[in-house]
Amino acid sequence: MTLPLEDYAVIGDLRTTAVVGANGSIDWLCLPDVDSPSCFARILGDESHGFWQLAPSSGGNATRRRYRENSLVLESEFDTPTGTVRVTDFMPIRETHPQVVRLVEGVTGTLDMRMNLTVRFGYGSEIPWVTSTDGLVRMTAGPESVALWHEVTAVGEDMHTVADFSVSEGQRFAFTLVWYPSHEDPPPPFDAMWALRHTDNFWRDWAAQCTYEGPWRDAVVRSLITLKALTYAPTGGIVAAATTSLPETLGGGRNWDYRYCWLRDATFTLESLMRGGYFEEAAAWRDWLLRAVAGDVGNLQIMYGPAGERRLEEWEASWLPGYEKSAPVRIGNAASRQFQLDVFGEVMSALYHSAHAEGVINTAVWNLQRVLMDEVESRWVEPDEGIWEVRGPRRHFTYSKVMAWVAVDRAIKTLEEWPDLDGPMERWRSLRQQIADEVCSRGYNEAIGAFTQYYGSDQLDASLLRIPLVGFLPPHDPRVISTIDAINTSLRDEGLVLRYRIHESDAGEDSCTNVDGLTGREGAFLACSFWLVDCLHLIGRTDEASELFTRLLALRNNLGLLSEEYDTVAHRLVGNFPQAFSHVSLVSSAYRLGQGDAANAPRAATRVRRTVNYANSLFSPAAKSAPTSRHHHGR
């Protein structure tokens, strides 16, 4: 039976990730890269689709699980009537081939263990040819192979590779799974204890650079480590999640492949990493962006593969029944071909903040920004699919227009701060005014006292919580406050925030088509809930903000991980896991709530002062990015 997402952890090597259950089973792993076909897909099906379980023969979940402090090394302890065993799971930072290392250590007593390795390449569809010698099992299908190096006796059993063994206090057994091209010989494993120390030190050293010192440091550091785990080291790309097709509601069909680099998600991730003091990741993402969009920016995609791949055709793995029967399982993402106007604003804003943090502007980056601005100038009047990737008709989504304003605003501010750059300042100022006027006249509904989902609509949308966060209007503008109040009242579900209301019909859920072109409901969107935290704090309702933030922290599993959404009916995490958008928003809210708190004082004077000043000034919604007083907004 599939585990709830709360019972999963993630490990990774900065090129791919493995999802590990509390029952000692790795139920999702794509090799050699995060967007490669999986060799373990039980999370989307059953045992026949691949898994690797290492646990006491008596079964059951771990009694205790934890990451080693500030690390991505996972420790799970199982208590049985005859003793306690610890299983340590990690992926060494890759040098050549990807490896998963699992260490079994006897803590007390003696107990029986069982290993079950079931490799199924091609998202669970391909059974490999298996050969075995002492200490080594090879599994091959077509161009790829995996090898299991082990220190116990392993045998074949009903198309599985199993090992039954005992472990006593003080004993240790290592298991290493390594992927390699099938025309090569299997590479030898690392010394397991050396690999453990090296991996642990890598993550601890990386986490030690975090400049946040507020009251939620543990949550912030864990979120930043999770975001780092979702980066693709060779290129600097940042994927949205480690998985595909984990449903937004159990049994539903809103299931998407998130193993790609959304420009929007990567931009938010970039900002959170910079808030934490991680500027190298920001520079790597910027360079990835330059390569990914090289060529005709008129064909800008909203997402790319981790290395900048553009062809992400969507298809269905019909043999996989889906997580808890939530079909279909989708590979690839058709939304990659959508037009989403807001992406221009998010990318322009991120590049502006990156340049400001470094104190210099890269000529190649500015050339890209100029081309992006050409697109904004010509296309901001068009309808689009919007931030939520609707699969219904294009509309004039209000948030998309706000972010077009942000794109122009950040271009103007770049020129103001680097006067040697070339650009049509006055034309852009006029355009900024024009967009602002239109948004406030067509996007605000006087009857309901709120900005609405799209022009002429009476529907609310949680994306509009970002209006004060991006500086389009100041937090205390009456229209902002009334929009926050409307969303706080009408889009809350058990205290959490929905992206928008799903409209059900008398004919039943499955027959109702919504603005997004889909049927069925979805869970509360965690990033939107964090945005409400930010907005409540900005308008002076900090107690409410802190209460909601505390509630959101409590939704994390016991390892500090969040998925995309929370199902308020099933009371479970849902959506792809772990989700960058959720962790990015957690970091942002922690910083906002902590601004001005003495706990955020720098501990490493020069670097931390630079980071805190940067975060407080540039990411403050009342800072330089607000419209000028010439706008009719009344400032």
Image (spheres, grey):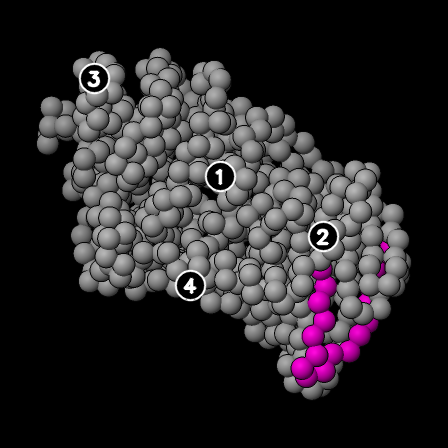
Residue behind mark 2: 178
Q: Residue at x 37, y 56 (%)?
A: 209
Where's the N terminus, which quadrant? bottom right
Q: Callout 3: helix, strand or loop? A: helix
Numbered tag placed on residue 482 in the rendering: none
Tell me how far mark 3 sits from mark 1, CA to CA: 32 Å
Where's the C terminus, which quadrant? top left
**Is residue 114 found left or right of 158 in the rendered image?**
left
Residue type, label 1: Gly
Q: Callout 2: helix, strand or loop? A: strand
Q: Between residues 47 and 184, which one lies in front from this camera angle?
A: 184
Residue behind mark 3: 425
Q: Nearer the viewer, mark 2 or mark 3?
A: 2
Tell me how far mark 2 sits from mark 3, CA to CA: 55 Å
Tell me how far mark 2 sits from mark 4, CA to CA: 36 Å
Q: Of marks 2 and 4, which one's residue comes earlier in the chain?
A: 2
Q: Nearer the viewer, mark 2 or mark 4?
A: 2
Q: Nearer the viewer, mark 4 or mark 1?
A: 1
Tell me how far mark 4 sits from mark 1, CA to CA: 31 Å
Residue type, label 4: Ala
Asked if one can make out residue 492 in the rendered structure from this viewpoint, the answer is no
